[in-house]
């Protein structure tokens, strides 16, 4: 289930799975991969999926539309009746109900020009901002007073989320005490953050 203390979310049962040790679900996610457990869990619960060739492509950048689909799937808040009020999101787009659901629930926002930019890559800072909006009513255990060396590059709207998740051990820096907030997030990073924030006990 979701972490205790979470509010404004539908509580539902997550399938209990056996240990993933020795089970390789995707050809490019070996057992020793740092995101192996997260990817396996989310895949097993139909929150994420791989590609037809049996790969997961962990280092591939994840787009804003793809992340919207994953987060509403994880939160069980998909509303296929929701409408996306963005200039670049059509009702015929595969991601339309997921973007609309994420917007309806306050997880994501668009841009001042009325666009969503669904095919743009999502940054590490933006992922933290979205996740924090999902769990900000949860009692995060902030055990760190870390200030990242590139603090000045963290967008103001994502600052609280970045430090709350970092202090709780949900996200990590990138070496040299840098967070690299504007770098593109990868599929593996997104899976690991969602798993640690929403599902790990």
Image (spheres, rainbow, N blue to C red):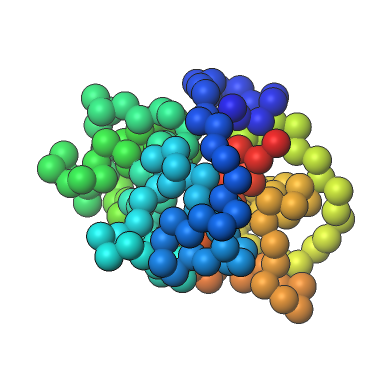
Task: Describe residue 51's horizontal placement relative to residue 102 as left or right.
Answer: left
Task: Describe residue 73's horizontal placement relative to residue 36 as left or right.
Answer: left
Q: Is residue 186 visible?
A: no
Task: Describe residue 106's horizontal placement relative to residue 194 as left or right.
Answer: left
Residue displayed at 35% across by 30% down: 78
Q: Which of 151 and 21 is in front in this view?
A: 21
Relative image position of residue 93 (x, y in whole percent): 18, 46
Relative image position of residue 117 (x, y in whole percent): 31, 57
The C terminus, quarter of image: top right
Residue occupying the far front of the picture: 22
Up/down of 12 relative to 161, above or below: above
Residue displayed at 55% across by 32% down: 16
Relative image position of residue 137 (x, y in whole percent): 67, 29
Residue displayed at 48% across by 45% down: 42
Relative image position of residue 154 (x, y in whole percent): 63, 63
Residue displayed at 75% across by 38% down: 140
Q: Is residue 48 visible?
A: yes
Up/down of 181 relative to 191, above or below: below
The N terminus, quarter of image: top right
């Amino acid at each position: 289930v979701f972490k205790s203390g979470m509010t404004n979310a539908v509580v539902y049962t997550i399938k209990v799975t056996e240990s993933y040790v020795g089970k390789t679900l995707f050809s490019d996610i070996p057992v020793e991969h740092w995101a192996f457990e997260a990817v396996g869990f989310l895949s097993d619960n139909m929150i994420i999926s791989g590609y037809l060739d049996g790969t997961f492509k962990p280092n591939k950048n994840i787009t804003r539309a793809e992340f919207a689909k994953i987060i509403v799937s994880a939160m069980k808040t998909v509303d296929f009746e929701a409408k996306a009020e963005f200039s670049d999101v059509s009702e015929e787009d595969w991601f339309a109900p997921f973007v609309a659901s994420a917007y309806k629930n306050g997880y994501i926002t668009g841009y001042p020009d009325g666009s969503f930019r669904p095919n743009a890559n999502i940054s590490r800072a933006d992922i933290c901002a979205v996740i924090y909006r999902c769990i900000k009513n949860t009692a995060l255990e902030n055990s760190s007073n870390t200030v990242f060396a590139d603090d000045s590059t963290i967008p103001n709207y994502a600052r609280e989320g970045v430090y709350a998740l970092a202090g709780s051990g949900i996200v990590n820096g990138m070496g040299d005490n840098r967070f690299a907030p504007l770098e593109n997030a990868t599929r593996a990073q997104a899976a690991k953050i969602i798993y640690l924030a929403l599902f790990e006990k």
